[in-house]
Image: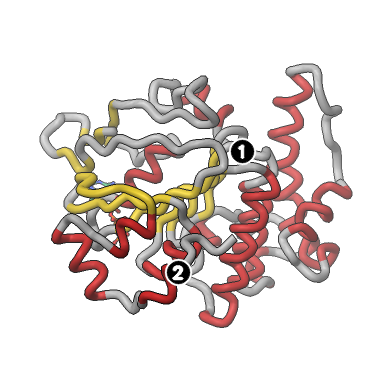
Amino acid sequence: MRTGDRAGERDLVRGVSFAVGTGERVGIIGESGSGKTLTCLAAAGLLPDGLTMTGSIAVRGSDRDLVSAGERELARLRGELVGMVFQEPMTALDPTMRVGRQVAEAIRLHARRTSAAGGTRRVRGADPRVLALLAETGLDDPDRVARAHPHQLSGGQRQRVVLAMALAGRPGLLVCDEPTTALDVTVQARVLDLIDRRAREVGAAVLFISHDLAVVASLCDRVLVLYRGELVEQGPTVQVLTDPQHDHTRRLLADSDLTGPMLDGGPVR
Ligand SMILES: Nc1ncnc2c1ncn2[C@@H]1O[C@H](COP(=O)(O)OP(=O)(O)OP(=O)(O)O)[C@@H](O)[C@H]1O
Protein backbone atom coordinates (compact mmCIF):
# COMPACT_ATOMS: atom_id res chain seq x y z
CA MET A 1 0.00 0.00 0.00
CA ARG A 2 1.24 3.45 -0.82
CA THR A 3 -0.45 6.76 -0.20
CA GLY A 4 0.74 10.16 -1.23
CA ASP A 5 -0.58 13.51 -2.24
CA ARG A 6 -1.78 14.01 -5.79
CA ALA A 7 1.34 15.81 -6.89
CA GLY A 8 3.32 12.85 -5.59
CA GLU A 9 5.51 15.19 -3.58
CA ARG A 10 5.09 13.49 -0.27
CA ASP A 11 4.34 9.88 0.52
CA LEU A 12 2.73 9.65 3.92
CA VAL A 13 2.55 5.87 3.95
CA ARG A 14 5.01 3.94 1.81
CA GLY A 15 5.02 0.32 0.82
CA VAL A 16 2.76 -0.85 3.63
CA SER A 17 1.54 -4.17 2.33
CA PHE A 18 -0.44 -6.80 4.19
CA ALA A 19 -3.35 -9.17 3.94
CA VAL A 20 -6.06 -9.78 6.49
CA GLY A 21 -7.39 -13.33 6.51
CA THR A 22 -10.99 -14.30 7.12
CA GLY A 23 -11.85 -13.67 10.76
CA GLU A 24 -8.28 -12.66 11.58
CA ARG A 25 -7.52 -9.84 14.04
CA VAL A 26 -4.67 -7.60 12.98
CA GLY A 27 -3.39 -4.82 15.23
CA ILE A 28 -1.56 -1.73 14.00
CA ILE A 29 0.80 -0.02 16.41
CA GLY A 30 3.28 2.81 16.02
CA GLU A 31 4.04 6.23 17.38
CA SER A 32 1.76 9.19 16.73
CA GLY A 33 1.93 10.24 13.06
CA SER A 34 3.35 6.90 11.90
CA GLY A 35 0.46 6.38 9.46
CA LYS A 36 -1.91 4.08 11.35
CA THR A 37 -5.06 6.07 10.64
CA LEU A 38 -4.21 6.66 6.98
CA THR A 39 -3.64 2.93 6.56
CA CYS A 40 -7.08 2.21 8.06
CA LEU A 41 -8.72 4.89 5.95
CA ALA A 42 -7.11 3.39 2.86
CA ALA A 43 -8.44 -0.04 3.84
CA ALA A 44 -11.92 1.49 4.16
CA GLY A 45 -11.65 3.45 0.91
CA LEU A 46 -11.93 6.71 2.85
CA LEU A 47 -8.65 8.49 2.28
CA PRO A 48 -9.08 12.27 2.60
CA ASP A 49 -9.33 14.38 -0.55
CA GLY A 50 -5.96 15.00 -2.10
CA LEU A 51 -4.47 11.72 -0.93
CA THR A 52 -4.19 8.81 -3.30
CA MET A 53 -2.93 5.31 -2.94
CA THR A 54 -1.80 2.45 -5.08
CA GLY A 55 -1.80 -1.16 -4.01
CA SER A 56 -4.44 -3.70 -3.29
CA ILE A 57 -6.50 -4.77 -0.30
CA ALA A 58 -8.62 -7.88 -0.44
CA VAL A 59 -11.35 -8.74 2.02
CA ARG A 60 -12.57 -12.30 2.51
CA GLY A 61 -9.92 -13.96 0.43
CA SER A 62 -8.83 -12.00 -2.59
CA ASP A 63 -11.95 -11.75 -4.71
CA ARG A 64 -12.49 -7.97 -4.26
CA ASP A 65 -9.95 -5.22 -4.49
CA LEU A 66 -11.02 -2.16 -2.51
CA VAL A 67 -8.17 -0.02 -3.75
CA SER A 68 -8.84 -0.27 -7.47
CA ALA A 69 -12.60 0.15 -6.97
CA GLY A 70 -13.94 3.52 -8.10
CA GLU A 71 -15.72 5.98 -5.79
CA ARG A 72 -19.23 4.73 -6.62
CA GLU A 73 -18.31 1.13 -6.24
CA LEU A 74 -16.59 1.89 -2.97
CA ALA A 75 -19.73 3.55 -1.64
CA ARG A 76 -21.55 0.32 -2.43
CA LEU A 77 -18.88 -1.98 -1.07
CA ARG A 78 -18.47 0.02 2.10
CA GLY A 79 -20.70 -1.47 4.75
CA GLU A 80 -20.87 -4.70 2.86
CA LEU A 81 -17.18 -5.49 2.94
CA VAL A 82 -15.85 -3.00 5.44
CA GLY A 83 -17.43 -1.56 8.60
CA MET A 84 -15.75 1.21 10.56
CA VAL A 85 -15.59 2.30 14.17
CA PHE A 86 -13.55 5.41 14.85
CA GLN A 87 -12.28 7.04 18.01
CA GLU A 88 -15.07 9.59 18.32
CA PRO A 89 -18.53 8.08 17.73
CA MET A 90 -20.10 11.47 16.94
CA THR A 91 -18.07 11.62 13.72
CA ALA A 92 -20.07 8.62 12.48
CA LEU A 93 -23.47 9.81 13.70
CA ASP A 94 -25.78 12.53 12.43
CA PRO A 95 -26.54 14.73 15.47
CA THR A 96 -29.89 15.82 14.03
CA MET A 97 -31.33 12.38 13.38
CA ARG A 98 -32.80 9.91 15.85
CA VAL A 99 -30.60 6.88 16.43
CA GLY A 100 -33.23 4.40 15.25
CA ARG A 101 -33.45 6.09 11.88
CA GLN A 102 -29.69 6.03 11.46
CA VAL A 103 -29.49 2.33 12.27
CA ALA A 104 -32.47 1.67 9.97
CA GLU A 105 -30.62 3.48 7.20
CA ALA A 106 -27.57 1.25 7.67
CA ILE A 107 -29.84 -1.82 7.50
CA ARG A 108 -31.70 -0.44 4.49
CA LEU A 109 -28.50 0.13 2.55
CA HIS A 110 -27.57 -3.48 3.07
CA ALA A 111 -31.09 -4.81 2.43
CA ARG A 112 -31.24 -2.95 -0.87
CA ARG A 113 -28.01 -4.56 -1.91
CA THR A 114 -29.13 -8.05 -0.95
CA SER A 115 -32.59 -7.64 -2.52
CA ALA A 116 -30.93 -6.47 -5.74
CA ALA A 117 -29.14 -9.80 -5.63
CA GLY A 118 -32.50 -11.55 -5.17
CA GLY A 119 -32.44 -11.72 -1.37
CA THR A 120 -34.18 -9.91 1.48
CA ARG A 121 -37.21 -7.63 1.01
CA ARG A 122 -36.66 -3.90 1.39
CA VAL A 123 -37.01 -2.64 4.96
CA ARG A 124 -39.42 0.24 5.75
CA GLY A 125 -40.10 2.46 8.75
CA ALA A 126 -39.56 1.33 12.32
CA ASP A 127 -38.02 -2.07 12.10
CA PRO A 128 -37.68 -4.73 14.78
CA ARG A 129 -34.30 -5.43 13.23
CA VAL A 130 -33.13 -2.01 14.44
CA LEU A 131 -34.07 -2.96 17.98
CA ALA A 132 -32.50 -6.39 17.57
CA LEU A 133 -29.23 -4.87 16.32
CA LEU A 134 -29.17 -2.41 19.20
CA ALA A 135 -29.92 -5.18 21.69
CA GLU A 136 -27.09 -7.28 20.24
CA THR A 137 -24.68 -4.51 21.13
CA GLY A 138 -25.72 -4.77 24.78
CA LEU A 139 -27.85 -1.62 24.89
CA ASP A 140 -30.28 -2.16 27.75
CA ASP A 141 -33.28 -0.27 26.47
CA PRO A 142 -33.17 -0.44 22.67
CA ASP A 143 -36.56 1.27 22.35
CA ARG A 144 -35.40 4.32 24.25
CA VAL A 145 -32.05 4.38 22.44
CA ALA A 146 -33.76 4.19 19.04
CA ARG A 147 -35.91 7.23 19.91
CA ALA A 148 -32.97 9.24 21.28
CA HIS A 149 -30.79 11.72 19.47
CA PRO A 150 -27.05 10.92 19.71
CA HIS A 151 -26.34 13.69 22.25
CA GLN A 152 -28.83 12.08 24.66
CA LEU A 153 -26.64 8.98 24.92
CA SER A 154 -23.38 8.41 26.76
CA GLY A 155 -20.14 8.01 24.81
CA GLY A 156 -20.17 4.25 25.42
CA GLN A 157 -23.77 3.96 24.21
CA ARG A 158 -22.95 6.01 21.11
CA GLN A 159 -20.00 3.75 20.30
CA ARG A 160 -22.28 0.71 20.66
CA VAL A 161 -24.69 2.31 18.19
CA VAL A 162 -21.82 2.94 15.76
CA LEU A 163 -20.75 -0.69 16.11
CA ALA A 164 -24.32 -1.83 15.42
CA MET A 165 -24.35 0.26 12.25
CA ALA A 166 -20.87 -0.89 11.20
CA LEU A 167 -21.93 -4.52 11.48
CA ALA A 168 -25.42 -4.11 9.97
CA GLY A 169 -24.17 -5.31 6.59
CA ARG A 170 -22.21 -8.20 8.16
CA PRO A 171 -18.93 -6.93 6.65
CA GLY A 172 -15.92 -9.15 6.13
CA LEU A 173 -13.66 -6.59 7.81
CA LEU A 174 -14.27 -4.32 10.78
CA VAL A 175 -11.83 -1.42 10.96
CA CYS A 176 -11.42 0.03 14.45
CA ASP A 177 -9.28 3.14 14.94
CA GLU A 178 -8.72 3.71 18.67
CA PRO A 179 -12.36 2.74 19.30
CA THR A 180 -12.25 3.20 23.08
CA THR A 181 -9.71 6.01 23.52
CA ALA A 182 -12.38 8.72 23.83
CA LEU A 183 -14.53 6.69 26.22
CA ASP A 184 -14.74 6.79 29.97
CA VAL A 185 -12.21 4.33 31.34
CA THR A 186 -14.95 2.41 33.14
CA VAL A 187 -16.66 1.42 29.88
CA GLN A 188 -13.59 0.85 27.71
CA ALA A 189 -13.18 -2.83 28.58
CA ARG A 190 -16.86 -3.55 28.00
CA VAL A 191 -16.83 -1.92 24.57
CA LEU A 192 -13.68 -3.87 23.65
CA ASP A 193 -15.30 -7.14 24.75
CA LEU A 194 -18.30 -6.22 22.66
CA ILE A 195 -16.21 -5.53 19.54
CA ASP A 196 -14.45 -8.85 20.09
CA ARG A 197 -17.70 -10.79 20.54
CA ARG A 198 -19.76 -9.16 17.80
CA ALA A 199 -16.96 -9.36 15.22
CA ARG A 200 -16.70 -13.07 15.97
CA GLU A 201 -20.48 -13.52 15.76
CA VAL A 202 -20.71 -11.94 12.31
CA GLY A 203 -17.46 -13.56 11.14
CA ALA A 204 -15.69 -10.24 10.52
CA ALA A 205 -11.93 -9.89 10.50
CA VAL A 206 -10.69 -6.92 12.54
CA LEU A 207 -8.09 -4.29 11.73
CA PHE A 208 -7.43 -2.65 15.05
CA ILE A 209 -5.44 0.47 15.90
CA SER A 210 -4.53 1.15 19.49
CA HIS A 211 -1.89 2.98 21.45
CA ASP A 212 -2.50 0.48 24.22
CA LEU A 213 -0.27 -2.53 23.63
CA ALA A 214 -2.05 -4.54 26.34
CA VAL A 215 -5.30 -4.13 24.41
CA VAL A 216 -3.61 -5.18 21.17
CA ALA A 217 -2.11 -8.19 22.98
CA SER A 218 -5.50 -9.24 24.28
CA LEU A 219 -7.35 -8.85 21.00
CA CYS A 220 -5.05 -9.38 18.03
CA ASP A 221 -3.58 -12.49 16.44
CA ARG A 222 -1.05 -10.52 14.48
CA VAL A 223 0.48 -7.09 14.77
CA LEU A 224 1.92 -4.60 12.28
CA VAL A 225 4.38 -1.97 13.48
CA LEU A 226 4.45 1.31 11.56
CA TYR A 227 7.21 3.85 11.83
CA ARG A 228 7.25 7.08 9.80
CA GLY A 229 4.84 5.70 7.24
CA GLU A 230 6.61 2.39 6.77
CA LEU A 231 5.87 -1.11 7.95
CA VAL A 232 8.98 -1.97 9.94
CA GLU A 233 7.90 -5.18 11.62
CA GLN A 234 5.02 -7.63 11.58
CA GLY A 235 4.26 -11.04 12.99
CA PRO A 236 2.20 -12.96 15.53
CA THR A 237 1.35 -10.61 18.40
CA VAL A 238 3.11 -12.57 21.12
CA GLN A 239 6.25 -12.91 19.01
CA VAL A 240 6.46 -9.22 18.12
CA LEU A 241 5.75 -8.07 21.65
CA THR A 242 8.07 -10.52 23.39
CA ASP A 243 10.90 -10.58 20.88
CA PRO A 244 10.80 -7.26 19.01
CA GLN A 245 13.25 -6.98 16.15
CA HIS A 246 13.01 -3.30 15.33
CA ASP A 247 14.23 -0.46 17.56
CA HIS A 248 10.92 1.35 17.20
CA THR A 249 9.01 -1.69 18.49
CA ARG A 250 11.39 -1.91 21.43
CA ARG A 251 10.79 1.76 22.20
CA LEU A 252 7.03 1.31 22.03
CA LEU A 253 7.31 -1.60 24.42
CA ALA A 254 9.57 0.29 26.80
CA ASP A 255 7.07 3.17 26.88
CA SER A 256 4.09 0.88 27.50
CA ASP A 257 2.60 -0.67 30.63
CA LEU A 258 2.67 -4.09 29.04
CA THR A 259 3.86 -6.84 31.36
CA GLY A 260 4.71 -10.48 30.69
CA PRO A 261 1.50 -12.00 32.13
CA MET A 262 -0.59 -9.92 29.70
CA LEU A 263 0.98 -11.88 26.87
CA ASP A 264 0.48 -15.34 28.32
CA GLY A 265 -1.65 -17.37 25.99
CA GLY A 266 -1.93 -14.67 23.32
CA PRO A 267 -5.31 -13.21 22.34
CA VAL A 268 -7.93 -13.74 25.04
CA ARG A 269 -10.88 -15.29 23.22
N1 LIG B 1 -5.31 14.81 5.13
C1 LIG B 1 -3.99 14.84 5.30
N2 LIG B 1 -3.21 15.60 4.52
C2 LIG B 1 -1.87 15.66 4.68
N3 LIG B 1 -1.21 14.95 5.61
C3 LIG B 1 -1.92 14.17 6.43
C4 LIG B 1 -3.35 14.06 6.32
N4 LIG B 1 -3.78 13.20 7.28
C5 LIG B 1 -2.68 12.79 7.94
N5 LIG B 1 -1.57 13.36 7.46
C6 LIG B 1 -0.17 13.14 7.92
O1 LIG B 1 0.13 11.78 7.63
C7 LIG B 1 0.96 11.23 8.65
C8 LIG B 1 0.29 9.99 9.22
O2 LIG B 1 -0.90 10.37 9.88
P1 LIG B 1 -1.85 9.32 10.62
O3 LIG B 1 -3.03 10.08 11.10
O4 LIG B 1 -2.08 8.16 9.75
O5 LIG B 1 -0.92 8.89 11.86
P2 LIG B 1 -1.29 7.99 13.11
O6 LIG B 1 -0.22 6.97 13.22
O7 LIG B 1 -2.69 7.49 12.99
O8 LIG B 1 -1.17 9.04 14.29
P3 LIG B 1 -1.99 9.14 15.68
O9 LIG B 1 -1.57 7.98 16.50
O10 LIG B 1 -1.53 10.44 16.26
O11 LIG B 1 -3.45 9.14 15.34
C9 LIG B 1 1.14 12.32 9.68
O12 LIG B 1 2.38 12.93 9.41
C10 LIG B 1 0.01 13.27 9.41
O13 LIG B 1 0.36 14.58 9.78
Q: Residue at x 22, y 35 (%)?
A: 15
The response on whether ligand 1 sits within 8 Å of label 1 is no
Residue located 43% across and 35% down the image: 45
In the image, 42 versus 217, the foreground residue is 217
Q: Quick one: 45 or 146, which is closer to the camera?
A: 45
**Residue 59, placed above or below residue 234:** above
Name the residue beneath numbered marker 2.
Answer: 264
The residue under label 2 is which amino acid type?
Asp
Q: Is residue 252 left or right of residue 152?
A: left
Q: Quadrant of residue 216?
A: bottom left
Numbered tag placed on residue 171 in the rendering: 1
Q: Quadrant of the N terminus?
A: top left
Left or right of 100 in this view: 224: left
* Dot placed on the residue nearer the N-terminal end, 2 or 1: 1
Q: Residue at x 33, y 48 (%)?
A: 235
Taking the spot 43% from the left edge, 49% from the top edge, the residue there is 26
Q: Is residue 37 in view from this perspective?
A: no
| Badge 1 amino acid | Pro
- x, y (%) of residue 173? 54, 40
Is 69 drawn above or below residue 19 in the view shown?
Answer: above
Residue 147: give x, y in percent of width and height: 80, 62
In the depicted view, which residue is nearer to us: 240 or 140? Answer: 240
- Circle 1: element type: loop
Give the CA separation, mark 2 to mark 1.
30 Å
Model colouring = secondary structure
Q: Inspect this view and state whether residue 78 appears.
A: yes
